[in-house]
Amino acid sequence: MDVKEQVLKIGADAKAASRELAKLSTRKKNAILEAMGEELDAQRAFIQAENDKDLAAGKEAGLTAAMLDRLKLTDDRIDAMIKGLRDVAVLNDPVGDEISTWNRPNGLEIQKIRVPIGVIGIIFESRPNVTCDAAALCFKTSNAVILRGGKEAIHSNLAIAAAMQKGGAPKGMPEAAIQLIPTIDRKAVKVMCQMTGYLDLIIPRGGESLIRAVMEMAHVPVIKHYTGVCHTYVDVEADITMALDIAENAKCQRPGVCNAMETLLVHKDIATDFLPKMGEKFSNQNVEIRGDNATCALIPSALPATEEDWTTEYVDLILSIRVVDGVNAAVAHINQYGSGHSDAIITKDEKAEKTFLAEVDSSTVYVNASTRFTDGAEFGMGAEIGVSTDKLHARGPMGLEELTTYKYVVHGKGQVRD
């Protein structure tokens, strides 16, 4: 069987499985999710052994430290996957929820209810935990899922998917509810993107080049974000200690992810006090700073920033810093150079806060908190399918509700239209 035939068969099997999934009760789905978690735990050693193969190949291929960090499956990260399955199991199942209902003058009762999307394709890079998170959320919402991970995580992804299938099968999970495309051949992505008869939605997760390639090839709807160029603006009325801690967390806690800060904006009236302290903190964390003239004067180790730096998602310990005149200048910078992902203001000034929240056009905006919280689990969604910077139909971290669509159910008593 060639790649096209293989992927089309996976699509046909997923379509059939989606019809079976629609019949499963919430109780049964939850029991299957619990069983998946138990099997992941039972196969922990095997999953980590397979992950070691990917890490060894990644080092040989010259992956950056940040990319290797995304790839690595520690005990804590496997624990987080298991916890994510259990968290999703106890969340409300949105399928069948009534969004609204109303009655027409002719006696018709119209209901708008949540239903599964059908078959969802997830194309992702590097992070093997996405295999578990995406599959769990799709399964809970009665969507069949087709996963296509990057070649750098192929052994890890196959091991995780196999464990979930093995755990769920005895509890009644349809065989093709969760499928991982087993080839690293790039032709598989093109075939997947154009399976209009089988696939209802694609969600790409990875670098900008992957997402743009998917958009160019896709014949089915796509929900995505291209980059995570996230900002933190430290206002003149900021609590300096708070600002230092938040900025350090936003950049350094895990730099290789899309909600890490890539640009720090600082009000000119506090720059002389704030930036040398911030520079010292970043130096201790081995952060390379690229700044404007004012920043380079206050942090001698900083390199001059180029125009390209303001639009760059480094996913590494590199940061751009600019000194700005105030909140309006910060907003203008973010709306010009940002990616609509996550942006924060640190301030005690209510007027500056309101301006920032109203005028920054991003999926998630923060006041006095780190952008690192833009995450489905941190938002109480159990796990996330991804972060969308689109405006239709989902925006920001995508959880269970964002994996449903709706249908109208109309009850009548013999009405006919005049």
Image (cartoon, rainbow, N blue to C red):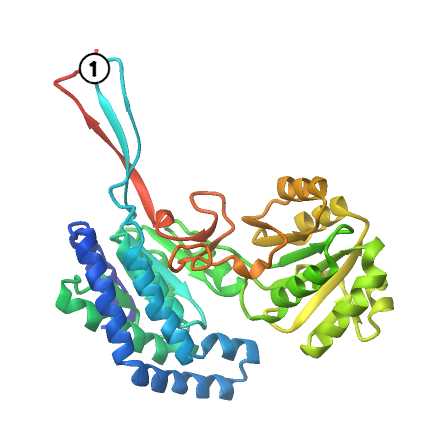
Count every numbered label the image shows and give the total.
Answer: 1
Query: Considering the numbered disc 1 on the image, is that residue within a helix, a strand or a loop?
Result: loop
Residue 69, relative to residue 291: is it above or below? below
Q: Which quadrant would residue 7 be assigned to in this image? A: bottom left
**Residue 43 location (% of width, % of height):** 27, 81
Look at the image and tell me in which quarter the N terminus lies: bottom left
Report the residue at 66% width, 67% height from top. Answer: 248
User: On the rendered structure, is 416 left or right of 203?
Assistant: left
**Residue 217 location (% of width, % of height):** 43, 57
Q: Nearer the viewer, residue 105 or 182?
A: 105
User: On the rendered structure, is 85 left or right of 204?
Assistant: left
Report the residue at 65% width, 57% height from top. Answer: 231
Tag 1 residue: 417
Look at the image and tell me in which quarter the C terminus lies: top left
Residue 354, relative to residue 310: is it above or below? above
Report the residue at 32% width, 55% height from top. Answer: 120
Q: Nearer the viewer, residue 18 or 72?
A: 72
Give the residue type that dot 1 points to. Arg
Q: Is there any visible trace of residue 160 in the rendered image?
A: yes
Q: Which quadrant would residue 342 be assigned to in this image? A: bottom right
Q: Is there any visible trace of residue 16 in the rendered image?
A: no
**Residue 319 location (% of width, % of height):** 69, 67
